[in-house]
Amino acid sequence: MSTPSTPLISIAMPFYNAERTIGASIRSLLLQTYPNWELLLCDDGSTDASRELARAFDDPRIVVWGDQRRLQLGARLNECIDRARGEYIARMDADDIAYPWRLEKQLRFLAERPNVDLTGGCAVVFADGGAPLGKRNYPAAHADIARRPLHWFKLMHPTFMGKTSWFRRYRYRADAIRCEDMDLLFRAYAGSRFANLQEIVLGYRQGSIDLRKCLRGRWMWFRCSGRYLNGAELLRVGALEALKGCWDVFAVAVRADAAWLRSRYAALTEEELTEWRQVWDSVS
């Protein structure tokens, strides 16, 4: 396959024990309508066949590496940022599915809006087997995305695409485990401009709540926020995360976690359902 020597987009996809899902994720990128990209696949110490599966794809745009250590997502994303040759970096996880026009539409959006540093988009939420659960919608404007920065930025991490220079300016904190995106956005939002495409660009795989990981993420965000906040604001973050953690425990205890997750999603239209089935069938 003949490709330009320098890609315009670098896709950062660290992975860990993703042998069940990584093949479909990579295939969704091979089907992109925009071809000038590189896929940076950093193995974070997998103990399954993930790396072998990734290397089995015969495409010069795919770069796979790893050192058998488990360093967590933030550190591996920084490796991808350092290796990126593109003008833009796109994020994606190794269990999600990119819609075929994702890169083309996000690239056009950013090229037409040079004042935007980082954009995301909407996503279909699906279960194992591709069953659609609903849609996650996000506001278009920066003010709405960053309206409650201590609580939540309305930008979905696996849909991030932005200027490589922006990612190199702010980078990820390696110790912000399970809150890498929240920490990054909190540090950057005052001096940046965020946006969301009002279109579905990704299929986001959703399992049941992993209570241990969820609670750890809430604790880690409280710890990280201590770097930037003090007094009443820090207490507010701690109280809010504790309240959310109690709800997580309750939902799992009464086996209502799946229903609670579904209640957060918008309904898909018939057109969106048909579109998702076509996307899923193309990579399955």
Image: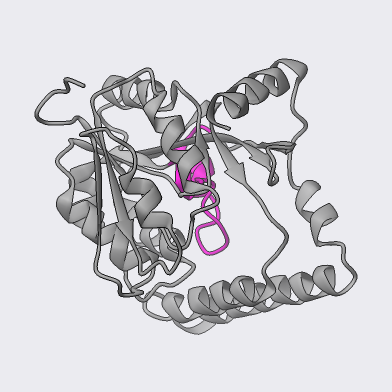
In this view, the residue in front, 97 or 171, is 97
Q: Position of residue 21 (x, y in %)?
A: 53, 48
Query: Is residue 143 one of those drawn in magenta?
Result: yes
Which residue does the image show at 30% across and 19% down from the upper left?
Answer: 112
Q: Is residue 14 visible?
A: no
Q: Position of residue 62 (x, y in %)?
A: 26, 40
Which residue does the image show at 18% across and 37% down from the upper left?
Answer: 86
Above or below, 75 relative to 232: above
Above or below, 126 relative to 189: above
Q: Position of residue 212 (x, y in %)?
A: 64, 77
Q: Quadrant of residue 268?
A: top right
Q: What are the residue bounds of the magenta stretch?
A: 140-159
Instruction: State left or right for residue 190 relative to residue 208.
Output: left
Count of picture labels: 0
Q: Position of residue 271 (x, y in %)?
A: 71, 15
Instruction: State left or right for residue 16 relative to residue 97.
Output: left
Which residue does the image show at 36% across and 56% down from the upper left?
Answer: 51
Query: Is residue 50 one of those drawn in magenta?
Result: no
**What secondary structure do most residues of the magenta stretch adopt?**
loop
Above or below, 188 relative to 254: above
Extreme left residue here? Answer: 5
In this view, the residue in front, 165 or 203, is 203
